Image: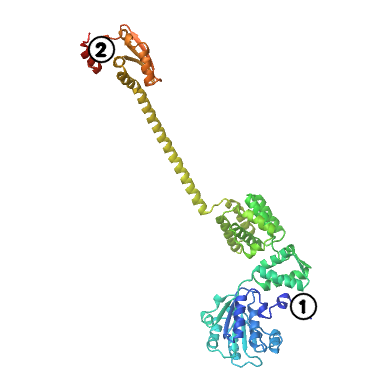
């Protein structure tokens, strides 16, 4: 018996075997159970996710003699004929190689005949978007008024290239990419069935490279299994010419350290080993995309399937970049992939970009820049306000000091007023002395010798003690320095107390 590749051997035969498309499988099974299958269906989605396989299962379910809950039995003659490709009532056409109007006219003519052995005639047109405009127009009439026994199932990876008049006549089912977890789960089942040993990291890597397509994953597993008894991470990398993610971990570390020499040398070493430049640029961009996801705590299938050690190192590296920088580097590397197609010296173009990346690491996010500017403004405002407050405080201090000085300047005058109330004679005498020196509480004053009996002794000391002990009053008595009569004339004759004494004792002022 000839060898059957995994992609064919493990193709789904029942709806329950279809992986990751539960939202479509449930609808189709219910439609079969209730006999409400539309005359035209469009299956769209990425390659290798089960569109054509589901179309074949639906064709079997429509013609099965023993349908079980919408599932084909796989045992009746109709099911076996369809599985083996012998049923003339189920026609599968490749739209890429049968895209002209003549082929579609022939199909339309066949649709006019009743089914020979099955219940329904089913036409499966794969890659239907490849049909010409004329071929599409030839389909319109039969899609508008189809025979009761005819069903059309169109499969395409590019539904946007199918003309609107065809789309409007079909029920559309969108198939999605398969999660990495689902692909790995199926790969484990196949490895067990085929007695293939494996490392989980190796299966995860195959699932990542399959980009959501089960067929691609099976093809890669089949290829590695032919060469190795065990599926390992390193084997997957080496066989498919894929760069080890550890390489990019080390390369980005050199970017963080701004080791331009080390970056270029790593690239040169890569080329010497025969790796493709475009693959390097593409996977380098992919790694920076991982850093963006990790920095923002976004978990995807690709992130979940990373090796734990790589995950931790990449998470730490992402902290050295701003989101703006990561997006810019990723975008420039993607643009570089496009430029390489037209570059005459691809190596130089890549090295030029690699030399630019380390100088982009200090970039900041716009929100962070605005925040820093606002903080700077607030700081500058606080500094200005502090300076103003300091100046105000200095001015206020000077004003207070001036007031204190003014108070100190008036302290002797207040002392005299105090003395006038307590001892009018002493107060009047002090008021008419000659001030020789004056410093804060220190006052040096001169009086005529004739007033020595009035100002000498404990009188002044008692008055100072009663007013303010801080006053330091130094009194000098001059023999000829002051006119005695000036003191009396300028004050005593107007003093109320003196006048009262004179009145009471009938006294008079003697000059």
- Please give the label number shown on residue 3: 1
Q: In percent of the image, x 70 and y 70: which residue is there?
A: 185
Q: Nearer the viewer, mark 1 or mark 2?
A: 2
CB within 8 Å, label 1 to label 2: no
x and y percent of residue 72 in the render? 67, 84
- Please give the label number shown on residue 488: 2
Q: In percent of the image, x 66 and y 92: which residue is there?
A: 117
Element marked by disc 1: loop
Nearer to the camera, 72 or 327: 72
x and y percent of residue 91 in the render? 64, 86
In the image, is residue 491 above or below residue 373?
A: above
Element marked by disc 2: helix
In the rendered picture of this protein, how many numbered marks are placed on residues? 2
Residue 127 at least partly seen: no
Nearer to the camera, 133 or 317: 317
Nearer to the camera, 190 or 420: 420
State the image quarter where residue 206 is shown: bottom right
- Please give the label number shown on residue 395: none
State the image quarter where residue 275 is shown: bottom right
In the image, is residue 386 above or below residue 176?
A: above
Q: Residues within 10 Å of mark 2 (few under 14, many from 20)?
A: some
In the image, is residue 28 above or below residue 117?
A: above
Q: Mark 2 or mark 1, which is nearer the start of the sequence?
A: 1
């Amino acid at each position: 018996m000839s060898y059957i590749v995994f992609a064919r051997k493990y193709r789904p035969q029942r709806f329950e075997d279809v992986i990751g498309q539960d939202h479509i499988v449930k609808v189709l099974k219910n439609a079969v159970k209730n006999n409400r299958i539309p005359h035209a269906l469009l299956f769209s989605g990425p390659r290798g996710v089960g569109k054509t396989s589901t179309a074949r299962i639906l064709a079997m379910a429509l013609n099965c003699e023993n349908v079980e809950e919408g599932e084909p039995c796989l045992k009746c003659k109709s099911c076996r004929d369809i599985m083996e490709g012998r049923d003339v009532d189920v026609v599968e056409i490749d739209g890429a190689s049968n895209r002209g109007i003549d082929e579609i006219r022939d199909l339309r003519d066949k649709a006019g005949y009743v089914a020979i052995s099955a219940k329904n005639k089913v036409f499966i047109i794969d890659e239907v978007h490849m049909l010409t405009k004329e071929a599409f127009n030839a389909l319109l009439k039969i899609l508008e008024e189809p025979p009761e026994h005819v069903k059309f199932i169109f499969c395409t990876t590019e539904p946007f290239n199918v003309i609107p008049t065809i789309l409007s006549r079909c029920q559309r089912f969108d198939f999605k990419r398969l999660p990495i977890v689902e692909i790995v789960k199926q790969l484990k089942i196949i490895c067990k069935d085929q007695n293939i040993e494996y490392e989980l990291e190796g299966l995860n890597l195959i699932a990542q490279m399959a980009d959501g397509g089960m067929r691609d994953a099976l093809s890669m597993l089949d290829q590695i299994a032919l060469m190795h008894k065990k599926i390992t991470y390193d084997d997957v990398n080496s066989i498919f010419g894929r760069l080890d993610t550890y390489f990019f971990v080390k390369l980005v570390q050199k970017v963080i350290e701004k080791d331009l020499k080390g970056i270029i040398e790593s690239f040169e070493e890569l080329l010497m080993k025969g790796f493709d430049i475009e693959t390097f640029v593409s996977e380098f961009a992919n790694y920076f995309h991982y850093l963006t996801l990790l920095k923002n705590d976004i978990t995807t299938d690709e992130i979940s399937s990373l090796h734990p050690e790589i995950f931790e190192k990449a998470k730490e590296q992402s902290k050295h970049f701003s989101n703006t920088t990561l997006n810019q580097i990723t975008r420039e590397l993607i643009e570089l992939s496009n430029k390489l197609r037209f570059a005459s010296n691809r190596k130089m173009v890549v090295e030029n970009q690699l030399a630019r990346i380390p100088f982009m690491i200090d970039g900041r996010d716009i929100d962070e820049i605005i925040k820093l500017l606002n903080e700077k403004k607030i700081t500058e405002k606080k500094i200005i306000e502090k300076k103003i407050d300091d100046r105000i405080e200095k001015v206020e201090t000077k004003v207070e000091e001036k007031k204190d000085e003014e108070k100190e300047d008036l302290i002797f005058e207040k002392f005299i007023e105090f003395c006038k109330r307590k001892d009018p004679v002493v107060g009047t005498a002090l008021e008419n002395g000659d001030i020789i020196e004056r410093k804060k509480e220190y006052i040096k004053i001169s009086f005529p010798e004739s007033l020595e009996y009035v100002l000498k002794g404990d009188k002044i000391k008692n008055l100072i003690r009663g007013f303010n002990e801080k006053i330091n009053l130094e009194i000098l008595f001059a023999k000829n320095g002051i006119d005695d009569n000036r003191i009396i004339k300028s004050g005593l004759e107007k003093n109320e107390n003196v006048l009262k004494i004179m009145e009471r004792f009938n006294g008079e002022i003697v000059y």
